Image: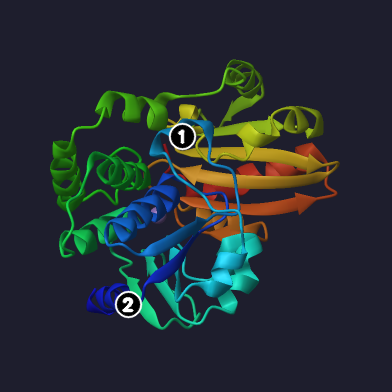
Amino acid sequence: MKDIKNLIKKYNSFALFCHISPDADALGSMNALRLVLKKLNKKVYAYCDGEVAKNLQFLDIVLEENEKHIQQVDACIMLDCNNSDRVGKYKDFYDNAKVKAVIDHHQESNYVFDYKLIDVTSPSTADILYELIKTLNITINSQIAVNLYAGLSSDTGGFIHANTTSLSHKHAYELLNYNFDLAEVNYQMFKYKGSEYLYFYKTALRNTKSYLNDQVYVTFFNVRSYEKFKDICENPIAFSFLEGIDGNEIRVKILEKQKDEFYISFRSNKYANVCNVARALGGGGHIKASGCVMSHILFKDMLSQILQECEKELKPQ
Ligand SMILES: [Mn+2]
């Protein structure tokens, strides 16, 4: 933490970056730091390769488009990622920065930074940043607080994922003292859906079939339905409405992104190791979330291979 404090003390102008397909932790952390640096009378510009989703407009983030500032600032800070591959179209700018810094909670890459604050045990970048901000001599206002709250609550799925700690709750408890509309923020982050979701859910339910005594659900989007709901299909939480149904252990999502090319992802509920399933089919991932690609195969052959591998990971009933 000292490292980044020195960086902030030493330099006067900064460019901030977060990862592509930005979530609330990426945008919220970046915007909170932008506001803090402004309070410290620093020049600061925030860059992001990607749209701010409609439901994150409440963060009131100000993004800079003009790239010329990047070459002029003293230092560049990357947030919620730790490799320049993750900042999309700003990669070359970041690679050529005079001074490179990072604040993050993801598994470390080999990328070399001059200033570094990475804590892989932290549930969010916002949690790390909040601890840092508390040591700086500034008054936190409600806008800074709401950006930090958005980041830390988003990465814990609203304080329900296994990464949630007592510290997450402590930080939230403290930030709630800064008077922002909590119900509205939670609505935007955890409930809001575009109107097209009704049609997406109808299609998804129609295309979900249950196997192996309801222990495995398979949802299939063929080329046509994938094209129709592409954006929603790519949202990892769009299919979470199938999560937690009693008796179900594995959820399989198959997206036919091109004719005969199937992008398959696996999620397990409590115990099944779906990394083994994906590996057996040429992919990989984590114990509870994994994926693979299968192509030029008959659907029924693919399905029987998938179910065969899933069955190996299920407890005998
Ligand atoms: Mn994060």
| Residue 2 coordinates in the image, percent (x, y) | 22, 77
Q: Quadrant of residue 60?
A: top left
Q: Reply above or below: 293 against 187.
A: below
Q: Nearer the viewer, residue 254 or 79?
A: 79
Q: Quadrant of residue 227?
A: top right
| Residue 156 coordinates in the image, percent (x, y) | 32, 45
Total of numbered circles in the picture?
Answer: 2
* Left or right of 293, for residue 135: left
The earlier-in-sequence mark between 1 and 2 is 2
Q: Reply above or below: 40 against 183.
A: below
* Left or right of 193, for residue 163: left
Q: Nearer the viewer, residue 188 or 223?
A: 188
Q: Reply above or below: 253 against 290.
A: above
Q: Which quadrant holds the N terminus?
A: bottom left
Secondary structure category for the residue under label 1: helix
Residue drawn at 45 percent across, 76 percent down: 74
Q: Amino acid at mark 2?
A: Leu
Q: Reply above or below: 170 against 247.
A: below
Instruction: Determine which residue is flagged by label 2.
Output: 7
Secondary structure category for the residue under label 2: helix
Q: Amino acid at mark 1?
A: Gln
Residue drawn at 33 percent across, 29 percent down: 186
**Which mark identifies residue 262?**
none
Q: Residues within 10 Å of mark 2 (few under 14, many from 20)?
A: some
| Quarter of the render that holds ligand 1 | bottom left
Instruction: Determine which residue is flagged by label 1.
Output: 57
Q: Residues within 10 Å of mark 1 (few under 14, many from 20)?
A: few
Residue drawn at 48 percent across, 83 percent down: 112
CB-based contact (under 8 Å), mark 1 and mark 2: no
Res 272 seen here: no
Distance from label 1 to label 2 (Cα)? 30 Å
